[in-house]
Structures are given as structure tokens and as C-alpha cells.
């Protein structure tokens, strides 16, 4: 397959990071698409959990919100939100958290709170939601977002959720026992933290993308790993699965636009 | 015992200017009809609490009903920003909004502490997060047994909690099902509570002995408002109107279109108008 968009490549590459054995805390948007593609292709037994309390959910269409009825209807069971965060997340039962963000830095810290000073923000973003504790309590974290200078910044205005902090063994020093971000999947390449410095480095490049493009789209001088591979292109099955669920989703979210 | 009453009475008797008010609902069962009645009655200086303030709180903020808000995620889920919330924080329009921002885990724990009659909640949270630098209500507590340092936040004890539930019986016992969020905790932690329901039935018949039931003696007022959660949804009654959530982005982006919408759909409307949404059940 050669006929695919960068966003499709990003979603499919992200889906491949997940396995059948994962118990995955799913963020809304791009992570939700990737997690469900994994479930519908190579990882049919993956457990998907949304913070609204739905556990083992198998939506036929992608939810617009983290609490669409579709998630509850297709879940193995649904718990209250305090139980979700206390027993299941803080209890250490989640292997993988899948997050998106507005901004990320070289140590995979995320900002979804403000652009500009907190007290007088230039742009007020929605905030952290579940992310601060997802980032520290899940076994590991995957992040997916398109690579751009606006999103991949040299310095964050605000750390909403900690990745590798200042790098190195910062997580360990704070007493965190989980791995933190282990992979960042973008629309043109994939990044992983350097084993020692924890700085994100390019490990895989999507088809048709040059190193120069990656350098130009990143807000810090980005490093490349010693061995950089070509990301395998999407298979026919992966692409068809993604396009089918997107089509079903679009149809489901349209409907009558009437006022309350 | 809960009083079965009208929405206008329930709001005028239980929501006072300056109150701390939680209108909860985690995407599901958001009490839109009750929130609109709060706006219609011109309640002011409210301090709003909600984990996921969405369109309803955008409406309350944009009409100037709120002096502040405690929250953990303020957006239009899957769509983008809450424009009225942003306008209040970025430009102080129509008035400045004091914010107290937390994470979901902290808010959920804080509601539970409120229901449990405890002064604070603790969690293994906020590690390495900047919210601890801007919110003085996030503190630390040391475990007396292990020495582990944990995050502490005050319990949530609203003056009044407002929720929407599926149904109630004639005595005022209330049933919730599906995504139940933090509504049980929010009601039990509050001084007063108002529950709107899709229908009032002769027998509640909870589907399981473990169903989420709020007994009449733990609720202040119960009001039948069919369709009262629209454009949110009521499990088994009607689906979420994702189309309306998408449409809200345009309505709220501009102050004039927002105000025109409020005038037409809240100030000139009545609680009974929500019933048309309930009738569309599949």
C-alpha cells in the first residue's frame, strides 16, 4: 500500500505499539482511534478502559467523548469514576496509558493546560483531566500527536503531566516506579527516549519522509538514534479497518442539529 | 424525605446567590434542564464545581452566573475549547472567573471524601505536575505508617448538588445506571440536593441489588423532567446528541450568537420543552 495519509500512518503505527495482553487506559481522539484499530486487527483481546469508568469496551464507532453511551453499552462492566481512579488506575492494574497533548518537550512532558502564563494565559486549554495520574500510575505511556513546531516545543509553559521530567533518572528520584513514556508516535516518524538521557530520539521514519523534514518540524534540535528503521507501511487490512471505522463514526456523529 | 416538586420551586428553594454548586455528570446524565432553570432565575455569584465542565457550565459562565469554578477538565469533549470559559479566563468577559484546578483523580477522591464525611482526600498524584505550583489547595500528607508522601486535597462539600437520574418512585427514591460518574458521592457530600429524572414510576424495581440507588431520605428534591439531560443522554432513554455538541462550537465562539442562543433557548423556554428530546428514544 502506498496510498495513505500521514494521519492514517500515525494511527496505524500507534496501533501496532499495543498488544493483546495490554490493559490500556485510552485518551480521547487520536489515541482512541489507535487503540480500537489494534483491537480490530492484531490485538482482539486487548482490554480498553476509558476514564468514564467503562472497562473492556468494544465500541463499533469511535466515541466523540470519553463517556459516549456506546462505550458503556459494549463494556464488560462500568464502574464509578472514583473506583476507576482509585482501584484500577492507582491500584496499578493498567499496563499502558495512551495520551495525546497540545504540547510536548524533549523529555515527553505534556502540556494541555495553558499557553502563556497560568494567571494570564494567551490560550486557555482544557486542562489535565486524568493525565497527571495516568502518566505516573500506568506501567508505561504511549503518546501520539502530529510533529509540528507548535506542538514539539523547546520549553513548555506548563507541565500538565510529567514524562521524564528533567531527563535521566528524574522519575526514579521522585519515587515513581513506572516507566513513563516509552514511545511517541507522530505523523512522520516515531520517537523513543534515549535509554540514559531519556531525551526523545527518532527511531523510525515513515515512508517518503526525509530527516530534514523531521528536523524542520521539531521545536528543539532533534537527535536520531544510531539505528533508524523505515516504518512498515500500512497493510491493506489495517487501512481498510481504519477507513471503515472512520466512516461509521462520521455517520454516527451526524444527525439532527436541534437546540435544547 | 425528598420532596417531589416543580423544577422552578426546587431551584428557587435550594440554590441561593453565592452558593457552591455542583452539577455533576460525567458526559452521561448532565442536568441541563436544571442548569437552564438556574440561569432563568438569575442566580448569581455561584461557585461552580464539576470534574468535566462542558457546555452547561459554558452557558452558566457566559451568562455571568459564576464567580468561580473548581474543575479538572474544561473542554467540549472531542470538539475543542469551551469558548465562553476561555473568554472568561483570557478576557474576563462577562466577569472574572476565579479558578481552582485539579486532576480527575484528585476531584474523584475529593468527592468521595465529602461523601465519607472526611475533611480531605489523599492520593498518589500530581507527581512532577505544575498544578501543585498554582493551586494552594494541593498539599502533601505523610503516611504515619510508611512515611510515603502523598498528595492531599480538601473534601468537596457543596452547598447544593444537582444531578439528573433515570427514574424515581413516588416516595423519591432515585435510580442511576450506566456511566454513573461521581453523582452518588456529589449528592451524599452536599448539604442539599436536587435530582431531576426522566420519569416517576410506581415501583423503582432496581435491576440489580447492587444498582446505584439514592434513597429518598438522602435527597432534598426530586423533579420529573423528561429529556432533562439533552444534549447529554440518559442510558436506555435517548442517545447523546453529538451533533449538538459539535454545533455548540460555532454558537459559543461569538458573544452575540451566544447571547442570542441563550435568549431564545433558555430565557424564553420552559423545563417542559426538554420533553421533545425524550420522545425521540430509539
Image (spheres, coloured by chain):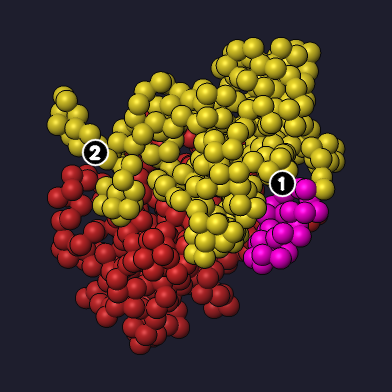
Chain colours: A red, B yellow
Where A176 falls versus A144 (above or below)?
above
Quadrant of the image containing the N terminus of chain B: top right
Horizontal side, residue A156 vs residue A1: left or right: left
Q: Where is residue A9 in the image (x, y as percent from the top left)?
A: 50, 70
Number of numbered tags placed on the structure image = 2
Q: Residue at x 74, y 30 (%)?
A: B7
Where A37 falls versus A209 (above or below)?
above
Horizontal side, residue B242 vs residue B85: left or right: right
Q: Main secondary structure of the magenta part?
A: helix
Q: What element carries label 1?
A: loop
Magenta segment: B241-267
Where A84 falls versus B68 (above or below)?
above
Q: Where is residue A95 in the image (x, y as percent from the top left)?
A: 35, 44
Q: Where is residue B282 in the image (x, y as percent from the top left)?
A: 81, 39
Residue B231 - label: 1
Out of A56 and B179, give the one closest to the viewer: B179
How much space separates mark 1 and mark 2, taking CA atoms?
Answer: 39 Å
Horizontal side, residue B85 vs residue A149: left or right: right
Residue B176, by quadrant, is top right
User: Is residue B197 in sight in this rendering?
Assistant: no
Where B187 falls versus A257 (above or below)?
above
Out of B93 and A209, give the one closest to the viewer: B93
- Tell me if mark 1 has few (under 14), some (14-19) or many (20+) residues whose alpha carbon lies within 10 angstroms of its own: many
Residue to which mark 2 is pinned: B140
Amino acid at each position: 500500500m502506498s496510498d495513505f495519509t500521514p494521519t492514517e500512518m500515525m494511527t496505524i503505527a500507534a496501533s501496532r505499539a499495543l498488544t493483546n495482553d495490554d490493559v490500556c487506559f485510552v485518551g480521547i481522539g487520536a489515541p482512541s482511534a489507535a487503540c480500537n484499530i489494534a483491537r480490530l486487527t492484531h490485538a482482539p483481546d486487548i482490554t480498553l478502559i476509558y476514564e468514564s469508568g467503562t472497562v473492556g469496551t468494544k465500541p463499533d464507532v469511535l466515541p466523540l467523548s470519553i463517556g459516549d453511551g456506546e462505550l458503556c453499552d459494549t463494556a464488560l462492566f462500568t464502574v464509578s469514576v472514583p473506583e476507576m481512579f482509585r482501584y484500577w488506575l492507582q491500584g496499578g492494574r493498567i499496563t499502558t496509558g495512551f495520551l495525546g497533548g497540545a504540547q510536548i518537550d524533549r523529555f515527553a512532558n505534556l502540556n494541555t493546560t495553558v499557553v502563556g502564563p497560568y494567571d494570564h494565559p494567551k490560550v486557555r486549554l482544557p486542562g489535565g483531566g486524568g493525565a497527571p495520574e495516568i502518566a505516573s500510575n500506568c506501567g508505561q505511556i504511549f503518546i501520539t500527536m502530529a510533529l509540528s513546531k507548535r506542538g514539539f516545543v523547546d520549553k513548555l509553559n506548563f507541565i500538565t503531566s510529567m514524562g521524564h521530567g528533567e531527563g535521566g533518572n528524574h522519575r526514579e528520584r521522585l519515587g515513581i516506579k513506572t516507566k513513563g513514556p516509552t514511545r511517541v508516535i507522530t505523523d512522520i516518524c516515531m520517537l523513543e527516549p534515549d535509554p540514559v538521557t531519556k531525551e526523545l530520539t527518532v527511531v523510525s521514519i515513515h515512508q517518503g519522509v526525509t530527516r530534514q523534514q523531521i528536523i524542520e518540524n521539531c521545536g528543539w534540535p532533534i537527535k536520531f538514534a544510531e539505528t533508524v528503521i523505515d516504518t512498515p507501511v500500512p497493510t491493506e487490512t489495517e487501512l481498510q479497518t481504519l477507513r471503515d471505522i472512520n466512516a461509521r463514526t462520521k455517520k454516527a456523529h451526524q444527525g439532527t442539529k436541534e437546540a435544547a | 424525605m425528598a420532596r417531589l416538586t416543580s423544577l422552578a420551586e426546587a431551584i428557587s428553594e435550594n440554590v441561593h446567590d453565592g452558593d457552591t454548586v455542583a452539577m455533576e455528570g460525567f458526559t452521561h446524565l448532565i442536568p441541563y434542564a436544571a442548569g437552564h432553570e438556574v440561569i432563568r432565575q438569575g442566580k448569581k455569584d455561584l461557585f461552580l464545581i464539576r470534574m468535566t465542565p462542558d457546555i452547561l457550565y459554558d452557558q452558566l459562565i457566559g451568562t455571568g452566573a459564576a464567580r468561580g469554578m473548581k474543575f479538572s477538565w474544561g473542554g467540549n469533549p472531542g470538539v475543542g475549547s469551551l469558548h465562553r470559559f476561555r473568554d472568561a479566563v483570557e478576557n474576563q468577559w462577562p466577569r472574572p472567573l476565579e479558578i481552582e484546578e485539579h486532576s480527575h483523580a484528585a476531584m474523584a477522591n475529593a468527592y468521595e471524601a465529602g461523601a465519607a464525611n472526611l475533611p480531605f482526600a489523599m492520593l498518589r498524584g500530581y507527581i512532577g505536575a505544575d498544578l501543585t505550583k498554582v493551586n494552594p489547595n494541593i498539599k502533601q500528607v505523610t503516611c504515619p505508617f510508611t512515611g510515603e508522601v502523598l498528595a492531599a486535597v480538601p473534601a468537596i462539600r457543596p452547598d447544593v448538588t444537582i444531578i439528573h437520574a433515570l427514574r424515581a418512585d413516588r416516595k423519591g427514591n432515585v435510580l442511576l445506571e450506566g456511566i454513573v460518574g461521581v453523582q452518588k458521592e456529589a449528592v451524599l457530600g452536599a448539604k442539599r440536593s436536587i435530582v431531576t429524572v426522566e420519569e416517576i414510576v410506581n415501583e423503582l424495581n432496581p435491576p440489580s441489588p447492587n444498582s446505584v440507588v439514592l434513597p429518598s431520605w438522602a435527597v432534598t428534591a426530586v423533579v420529573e423532567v423528561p429529556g432533562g439531560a439533552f444534549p447529554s443522554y440518559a442510558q436506555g432513554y435517548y442517545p447523546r446528541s453529538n451533533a449538538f455538541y459539535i454545533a455548540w462550537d460555532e454558537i459559543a465562539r461569538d458573544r452575540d450568537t451566544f447571547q442570542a442562543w441563550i435568549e431564545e433557548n433558555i430565557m424564553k423556554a420552559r423545563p417542559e420543552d426538554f420533553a421533545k428530546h425524550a420522545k425521540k428514544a430509539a
